[in-house]
Amino acid sequence: MNDDMTEKNPYLHELGQFLRARRGELSPEELGLPATHDAQRRVAGLRRQEVADGVAISQDYYARIEQGRLAPSEPVLEAIAHFLRLKPDQRDYLEGLAQRAERRTPPRPRPKLVRPQLQRLLDQLTDTPAIIVGKYLDIVAWNPLASALMVDLGRMTAHERNYVRMVFTDQRVRDLYYDWEAMARSSVATLRLQAADNPHDPRLAALVGELSLVSPHFRQWWADHRVARPDFGSKTIRHPELGDLTLDWDAFSYVGDPDQQLVMWSADQNSTSHDKLRILASWSARPAERGSDRKETRA
């Protein structure tokens, strides 16, 4: 990689901030370094010098990386990731930022339309709640059962139908989850990972700015620079009429547009949650507004 990239670069800036946040989470003792009881230690976690020594580079070189003034070489980046004990998702995020910093041009816009075939697939999933999530966790399509499970997505504007925005600003969505904090943290970490494509995207900046103003929690967790790529999991939802449903969920990427994911919920057939999904399915089968306005399928 080029070591002479001193002008402001959004990818290098984010790379440096990300490393700084991870450095602040580790203590010398965790890495087997000599314990320190220095009253003058003014930083949480490791010092820059300790990271630089750990990967055999100069303190100045490492400082310029964290300041967003320099793109580290691939071996150095790998050494830093190993020393800071980054997880696979964190390594992918870091490497993606470094690669985009080299390119210096915004990524090519990707298609934002939901193909009619995908909407047809959603409509045919009559006993499975399903949504399609686009860039920055916009909900771009859904089926009636998903609306019955969560909130009535058809009565929301496209602006409101952003999962992160819903988690932090819609009390109905907040009330769905027993462990709201875990869900909210996960959504922020997923959004942070998606932001690697273009950290200075005006649409992203508007979303982050809005949520930072209305939620101290979002502001704090966004500043933590945590990233995650959740592909499956289990959650208990507190439905306002049917009570608790414990559901498994899986996310599937769409090859035609990597920004879009199909997310589906299911329950064990021998569970009360499965029985409750069948009740919801019967309710959602009644004549009502369909899941996605065919004219409004842009992310």
Image: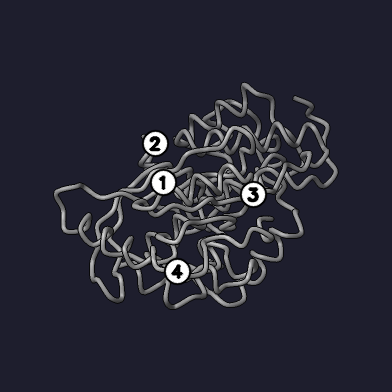
Amino acid under disc 2 = Leu
Q: Amino acid at mark 1?
A: Ser
Q: Position of residue 87 (x, y in %)?
A: 44, 36
Q: Earlier in the sequence, mark 3 or mark 2?
A: 2
For label 4, the crowd category at 10 Å Cα-Cα, with few meaning under 14, some 14 to 19 and many 20 or more, is: few
- The span from disc 1 to disc 3 (Cα, nearest Å) is 28 Å
> In the image, what residue occupies the spot 31% across and 49% down?
266
Structural distance between the alpha carbons of marks 4 and 3: 39 Å
Asked whether the beta carbons under mark 4 and mark 3 sit within 8 Å of each other, the answer is no
Residue ID for mark 4: 287
Q: Nearer the viewer, mark 3 or mark 2?
A: 3
Q: Amino acid at mark 4?
A: Pro
Residue sitting nearer the eye, 144 or 11: 144
Q: How is the image coloured?
A: one colour
Eye-nearest disc, 4 or 3? 4
Q: At x 62% / y 71%, what residue is drawn?
A: 157
Quarter-of-image position of residue 48? top right
Alpha carbon distance from label 1 to label 2 = 7 Å
- Crowding around mark 2 (Cα neighbors within 10 Å: few <14, some 14 to 19, many 20+) is few
Marked residue nearer the N-terminal end (1 or 4)? 1
Q: Which residue is mark 3?
A: 195
Q: Are marks 1 and 2 in contact (CB under 8 Å)?
A: yes
Amino acid on which disc 3 is placed? Ala
- Give the Cα separation between the discs numbered 4 and 2: 61 Å
Secondary structure, mark 1, is loop
- Give whichever of discs 1 and 3 has the lower sequence position: 1
Q: Which mark is residue 27?
A: 1
